[in-house]
Amino acid sequence: MRFASLGSGSRGNALVVEAKRTRLLLDCGFGVRETIARLSRLGLQPEDIAGILITHEHTDHIGGAVKFARRYEIPVWLTHGTFKNHVHAGSLADARLIDGHSVFQVGDIEVQPFPVPHDAREPVQFVFGNGSKRLGVLTDTGNSTPHIEAILSGCDAMVLECNHDPDMLRDGPYPPMLKWRVGGRFGHLDNGAAARLLAKLDNSRLQHMVAAHLSEKNNTPELARAALSQILGCAPEWVGVANQINGFDWRQVF
């Protein structure tokens, strides 16, 4: 199994997961042309994508999904709440509604959704498996829960939100209401909250740790790496960072 990011941040998110002959796109927050260009950087074409999974209805996660899916006749999996709360989801030719607690299979990839506290209608995140290895993805959650920790414990690779540094958010340029939203219980994980979540997990199998969804105005890669590496007892450089422009290149899970 391997995975790569097309880009991660408030201006667009998309992640590719591959196992054997199946490739899935997690979120599609870029326009069609941009999505094609970013896939090409990874050596992929739109026809290589077997399905799109949507975490929630915010534009940076679903903005390009409907047009991309319709153009290339790709099925889209999303919760009922996300489907009902996105204005264009009804025009999808192949929308497949999922339960946020029920595991399902897409080709060679087992998909385990799990609900998260975020300011959307029915948001979920996902763990992907190939029968022996597991990739956990958690972004866009305001706080952790015992269920989240149980689901993510023992993963072989993880993409974990480190959205902001609390001091930078407090002193930064965002208006007060946006600061309240980002830092609230249904907003985004800060570096410290991500580290505290990580400390509660079984990380003994972890081959890859990638910090994701970093705010370009309220965080730095150095701060995110420092927070996670302290918990893992590794060099900060071992922790990857998914950025807005390039995401990150393929990472293999053995």
Image (cartoon, rainbow, N blue to C red):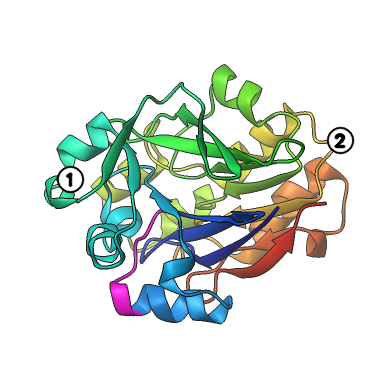
Name the residue tied to disc 1. Answer: 86
Name the outermost residue toward the top.
146
Q: Main secondary structure of the magenta part?
A: loop
Give 88 or 107, whichever is nearer the viewer.
107
Q: Is residue 26 visible?
A: no
> In this figure, what is the number of numbered marks?
2
For the residue pair 115 and 241, the one nearer the viewer reads as 115
Where is residue 14, by image quadrant?
Answer: bottom left
Rounded to the nearest angstrom, the CA distance separating label 1 from label 2 is 39 Å
Q: Is residue 107 magenta?
A: no
Q: Nearer the viewer, residue 38 or 74?
A: 74
In the image, what residue occupies the spot 36% across and 78% down? Answer: 34
Q: Secondary structure at mark 2?
A: loop
The crowding category of the residue bearing disc 1, from other C-alpha atoms within 10 Å (few below 14, some 14 to 19, many at least 20), is: some
Say whether disc 1 or disc 2 marks the residue closer to the N-terminus: 1
Dividing the picture into quarters, in which one does residue 60 lie? bottom left
Residue type at mark 2 is Ser
Could one spot residue 167 in this view of the protein?
Answer: yes
Look at the image and give the residue range highlighted in magenta: 27-33
Is residue 31 shown in magenta? yes
